[in-house]
Image (spheres, helix red, strand yellow):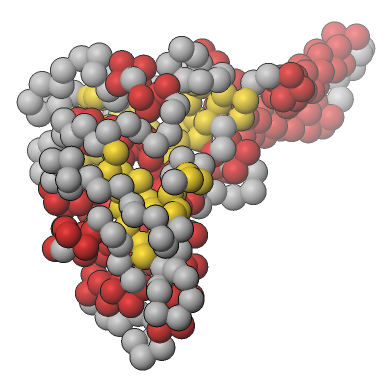
């Protein structure tokens, strides 16, 4: 068996896949749980995620076949059931194989970005097995490729933040009843500049110095303008009112613009997690910048992330975002169903929060 990036396992058609059923492990409950997790993602209606949900439904309904895998046409039919409308070409097996293969590639990328959140959800549910996307390649006419989800007792990615619950802070404290729990999610739909941080900006060698220059240069420029204005007032016998007002207005525009654009990059070193600047944000304004350091994480880097959860009061979707005026300077968890009343504190280390409203 060979693994691709620890995420997708591909085996030649003549090799028998790992039989997790014979080991006494019943994956039916896990498939149902994984489908529930995927259906709560913001991308739950996107085609590659729909295919994951369809594969979970197929596997839960047909556990004996799940250990071998499902052909493209089975997946296409299940996707149509989840979407509520047909997908691909039901009469053209070649087209179905092509469509499923294309979405399988997209799903692998999505899977990599969601793996940390999936792992945390499984650990919190006291499930000891971890899922791994797997595919058995077909071998000519009549031997289609088979798609499945394998379950293993060891995590497919050896990252310390995944393997050791204490390293993520997930089990440092026991959440009381009614407390919020947060799941860390990677950001996929980021723009060109934001993508630098969604992959994790590692603070080492030239990257560290570039980061410092990007922050310090505008600060020095603003300080230089302030010095010019001060010298102009103190050394000149007569003050040019028009020039002074122009300089003041320039400063009044440039300083806030600098802070809104680069301020979070400066604050993240002190606070460890801050709201991402406007040029990284989505329409939901729920993107954060987190400074990750050893030993909790493999390397020191600044990563753009999103923290989501389920509201313990009403079961609605919840995300960590600005505390606004009510909770100035704080990041809080807000429920989408009741964003004013269902508000929770946010701790990115323990990934938990308590109700802030009486």
Residue sitting at x 46%, y 58%: 12
Does residue 142 sit above or below 146 in this rendering?
A: below
Does residue 94 sit above or below 190 in this rendering?
A: below
Place residue 206 in its image quadrant. top right
Most distant residue in the top direction: 234
Residue sitting at x 64%, y 21%: 203
Does residue 36 sit above or below 126 in this rendering?
A: below
114 relative position to 3: left or right = left
Can the viewer see residue 341? no
90 relative position to 33: left or right = right
Place residue 246 in its image quadrant. top right
- Residue 148 percent location from the top left of the image: 32, 58
Residue sitting at x 49%, y 14%: 294
- Residue 354 percent location from the top left of the image: 18, 23
For the residue pair 261 and 99, the one nearer the viewer reads as 99
Most distant residue in the front direction: 14
């Amino acid at each position: 068996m060979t693994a691709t990036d620890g995420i997708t396992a591909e085996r030649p058609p003549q090799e028998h896949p790992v039989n997790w059923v014979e080991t006494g492990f019943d994956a039916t409950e896990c498939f149902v749980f994984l489908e529930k997790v995927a259906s709560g993602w913001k991308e739950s209606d996107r085609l590659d995620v729909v295919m994951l949900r369809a594969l979970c439904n197929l596997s839960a309904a047909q556990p004996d076949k799940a250990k071998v895998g499902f052909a493209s046409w089975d997946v296409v039919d299940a996707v149509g059931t989840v979407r509520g409308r047909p997908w691909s070409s039901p009469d053209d097996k070649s087209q179905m194989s092509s469509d499923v293969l294309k979405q399988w590639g997209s799903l692998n990328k999505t899977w990599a970005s969601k793996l940390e959140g999936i792992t945390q959800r499984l650990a919190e549910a006291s499930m000891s097995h971890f899922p791994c996307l797997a595919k058995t390649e077909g071998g000519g006419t009549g031997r289609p490729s088979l798609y499945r989800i394998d379950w293993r007792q060891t995590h497919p990615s050896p990252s310390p933040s995944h393997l050791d619950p204490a390293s993520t802070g997930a089990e440092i404290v026991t959440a009381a009843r009614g407390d919020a729990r947060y799941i860390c999610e990677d950001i996929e739909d980021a723009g060109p500049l934001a993508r630098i941080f969604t992959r994790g900006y590692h603070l080492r060698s030239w990257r560290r110095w570039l980061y410092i220059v990007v922050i310090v240069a505008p600060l020095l420029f603003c300080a230089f303008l302030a010095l010019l204005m001060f010298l102009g007032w103190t050394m000149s016998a007569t003050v040019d009112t028009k020039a002074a007002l122009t300089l003041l207005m320039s400063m009044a525009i440039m300083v806030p613009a600098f802070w809104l654009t680069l301020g979070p990059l400066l604050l993240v070193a002190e606070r460890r997690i801050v709201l991402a600047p406007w040029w990284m944000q989505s329409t939901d304004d729920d993107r954060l910048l987190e400074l990750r350091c050893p030993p909790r994480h493999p390397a020191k880097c600044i990563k753009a992330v999103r923290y989501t959860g389920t509201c313990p009061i009403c079961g609605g979707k919840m995300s960590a975002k600005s505390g606004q005026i009510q909770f100035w300077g704080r990041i809080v968890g807000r429920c989408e169903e009741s964003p004013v009343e269902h508000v929770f504190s946010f701790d990115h280390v323990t990934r938990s929060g308590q109700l802030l409203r009486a």
